[in-house]
Amino acid sequence: MLHVNPDQPAECENALIERVKSGDQSAYTMLYQLHIKRVYGLCLRLLADQSHAEDAAQEVFVQVWHKIAMFDGRSQFSTWLYSVASNIAINYLRKQKSWVQKVVSIEQGGMDEQSAKDCKGLNGLDKLIVRLPERARMVFVLFAVEGYRHEEIAEQLGIAVGSSKSQYHRARQLLQEWYENE
């Protein structure tokens, strides 16, 4: 049986992916175990809600099972996986909002300070990130954590590039202020 861990070379992960593509459920389980923590962390940072992050992370791996054949190996698997995860988390957030929330609350906040402190799976800066207002949090995570360009973020979120940049600046200011007050 092939055992893969994050310290092993990409060739082992590629072999695992090929087994998943052929329908091997044990290989899929190993791939899941290899990536679930990071996928969940990304979903939690974007959604700022533990139960929604768990749901979104599970949806990511359902999609991976169904769409693994689309992974062509031109990029790292993790790059493709985290792109799928960010898209699902953003779409999940859009679906969770009722039209009333969209009209009334354009700028929904993140987790409150106490919930962020109590949240399992978060430490350090992550406890501050989940407190950011929704749009600023999403832009910050996609830009600073995941490495997207502002043009990509703007397209993904349906906002102007300038809005992406200003939301990032806002997030940095809030994080710096909160960090200094801790």
Image (spheres, rainbow, N blue to C red):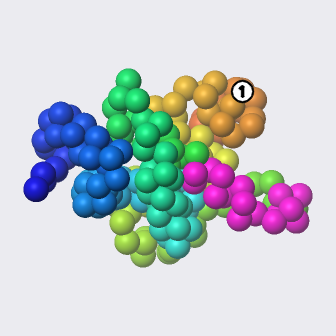
Determine the image quadrant of residue 26.
Answer: bottom left
What is the x, y in percent for residue 5? 16, 50
Which image quarter is the C terminus in? Answer: bottom left
Instruction: Please say whether residue 126 is visible from this viewpoint.
Output: no
Assess whether residue 99 is covered by the magenta stretch. yes
Q: Residue at x 86, y 62 (%)?
A: 99
- Between residue 29 and residue 148, name the one nearer to us: 29
Taking the spot 71% from the left edge, 65% from the top edge, the residue there is 96
Bounds of the magenta span?
A: 88-103
Q: Where 19 falls versus 103 (above or below)?
A: above
Residue placed most toward the observer, 95 or 66: 66
Q: In the displayed structure, would residue 100 be above or below residue 118?
A: above
Determine crowd level at label 1: few under 14, some 14-19, many 20+ residues with C-alpha closer than 10 A.
Answer: few
Left or right, residue 122 beside residue 58: left
Residue 70 appears at what percent x and percent y?
Answer: 47, 36
- Nearest the eye: 159 or 79: 79
Give the SS element for disc 1.
helix
State the predominant SS element of the stretch in magenta.
helix
Residue labelled with disc 1: 162
Q: Position of residue 56 (x, y in %)?
A: 53, 61
Look at 19% across and 46% down and name the residue there: 6
Asked where in the image residue 155 lies, by quadrant, the reply is top right
Q: Is residue 40 above or below residue 6?
A: below
Inspect this view and state whether residue 114 appears. yes
Q: Is residue 42 magenta?
A: no
Q: Would residue 160 be found to the left or right of residue 88 on screen?
A: right
Above or below residue 75? Residue 112 is below
Looking at numbered disc 1 in the image, what kind of residue is underneath it? Gly
